[in-house]
Image (cartoon, grey):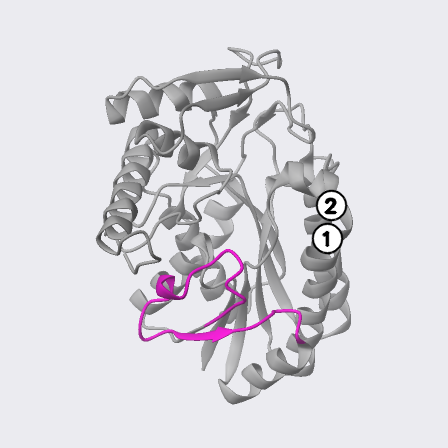
């Protein structure tokens, strides 16, 4: 039996492959490589290049690879982009996910782990925010993810499909063993862009909004190290296989850092005092999102071990340096880190 990892050539999906292989599981990565990289899929995981919304392909993989669980990561994830392209987000994140779930039901897959998001809460107001907080996404991205949670809830009542939806807060850092990290050059993640600025790949870093009702006026986010997040997925898989009921859990540390605090951490760790520009707010950005994640600890037995912002920044910085060294060695062509 094997686990199908959609978006398995991307940042979080690629780390899921590592986690599965380290645990002795078989992984099949499905990715269209629009933002992922073939080299991000470690051997002996199997890479299949294709669209997770291709029902014929997914059905064949479920059958031929003996898939017994699906970990669904593939999605569009840029909040401001979703505001200007809502139809694209509803097609990719919601409609195609419904097709994937339909294939899972038809193929007899019983266990489904869904990569959801804290964006389903919108501008929550309360801090930290628990799973029972009102759901009020303020962007098409958040709404597209919440719709999939609703689909899973309805499907689980009608069919023999059980799921865990993990609502991520802000994922950051890299594999502690140096095997993988965030590799998309134009990724919008704050820490990714900040370390690239520290390395001189951008002339400056933009901060969007300094008039939020937070301790320094910039947005607050709960930054969770990527391998800690993958540990939550592995615990969710074990929970489902043991007969656990359907579950929605937050994944975060329970405290946040402001944009300015992250920038200072990158400057501190890198030793570079790079230029910062100040711009207006972006559409769809809540002031603060910090997780209340006791449910994951209590129900899944999740025990995060890597809650250290400076170390998360150091991992991201080291990974970015490695990427740039490889690119230089390859004369600027795409290279396997």
The residue closer to the viewer here, 322 or 329, is: 329
Q: Which image quarter holds the C terminus?
A: bottom left
The answer to the question of whether label 2 and label 1 lie on touching residues, with beta carbons closer than 8 A, is: yes
Q: In this rendering, does residue 258 appear at all?
A: no
Residue at image mark 1? 88
Give how far across and how far down residue 166 sits, in percent.
56, 51
Q: Residue at x 47, y 54 (%)?
A: 300
Look at the image and give the residue range highlighted in magenta. Answer: 29-54
Q: Is residue 39 magenta?
A: yes
The residue closer to the viewer here, 102 or 202, is: 202
Q: Residue at x 35, y 64 (%)?
A: 39
Q: Report which quarter residue 107 is drawn in.
A: bottom right
Give how far across and how far down residue 251 sits, in percent.
50, 43
Q: Which image quarter holds the N terminus?
A: bottom left
Q: Report which quarter residue 137 is drawn in.
A: top right
Disc 1 packing (10 Å; few <14; some 14–19; many ≥20): some
Give how far across and how far down residue 193 sits, in percent.
43, 34
Q: Which mark is residue 85?
A: 2
Q: Is residue 322 rendered to the left or right of residue 50?
A: left
Report how many numbered discs are placed on residues in the image.
2
Give how far across and how far down residue 73 sits, in percent.
54, 58
The residue closer to the viewer here, 322 or 244, is: 322
Mark 2–mark 1 Cα distance, whole angstroms, equals 5 Å
Q: Secondary structure at mark 1?
A: helix
Q: Residue at x 66, y 41 (%)?
A: 81
């Amino acid at each position: 039996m094997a686990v199908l990892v959609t978006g398995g050539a991307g940042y979080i999906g690629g780390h899921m492959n590592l986690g599965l292989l380290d645990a002795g599981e078989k992984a099949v990565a499905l990715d269209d490589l629009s933002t992922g990289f073939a080299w991000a899929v470690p051997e002996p995981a199997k890479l299949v290049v294709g669209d997770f919304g291709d029902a014929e392909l997914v059905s064949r993989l479920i059958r031929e690879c003996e898939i017994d669980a699906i970990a669904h990561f593939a999605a569009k994830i840029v909040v401001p982009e979703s505001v200007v392209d809502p139809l694209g987000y509803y097609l990719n994140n919601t409609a195609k996910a419904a097709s994937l779930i339909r294939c899972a039901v038809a193929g007899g897959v019983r266990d489904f782990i869904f990569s959801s998001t804290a964006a389903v809460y919108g501008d929550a107001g309360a801090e930290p925010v628990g799973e029972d907080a009102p759901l009020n996404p303020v962007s098409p991205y958040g709404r597209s993810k919440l719709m999939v949670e609703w689909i899973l809830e309805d499907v689980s009542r009608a069919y023999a499909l059980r799921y865990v939806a993990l609502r991520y807060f802000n994922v950051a850092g890299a594999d502690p063993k140096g095997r993988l990290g965030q590799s998309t050059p134009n990724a919008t993640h704050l820490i990714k862009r900040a370390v690239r600025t520290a390395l001189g790949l951008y002339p400056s870093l933009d901060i969007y909004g300094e008039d939020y009702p937070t301790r320094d006026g910039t947005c607050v986010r709960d930054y969770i190290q990527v391998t800690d997040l993958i540990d939550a997925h592995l615990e969710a898989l074990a929970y489902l296989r043991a007969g656990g009921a359907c579950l929605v859990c937050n994944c975060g540390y329970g405290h946040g850092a402001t944009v300015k605090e992250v920038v200072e951490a990158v400057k501190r760790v890198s030793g570079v005092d790079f230029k910062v520009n100040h711009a207006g707010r972006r559409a769809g950005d809540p002031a603060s999102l910090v997780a209340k994640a006791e449910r994951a600890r209590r129900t899944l037995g999740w025990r995060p071990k890597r809650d250290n912002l400076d170390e998360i920044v150091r991992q991201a910085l080291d990974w970015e340096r490695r990427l740039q060294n490889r690119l230089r060695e390859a004369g600027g062509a795409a290279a396997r880190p």
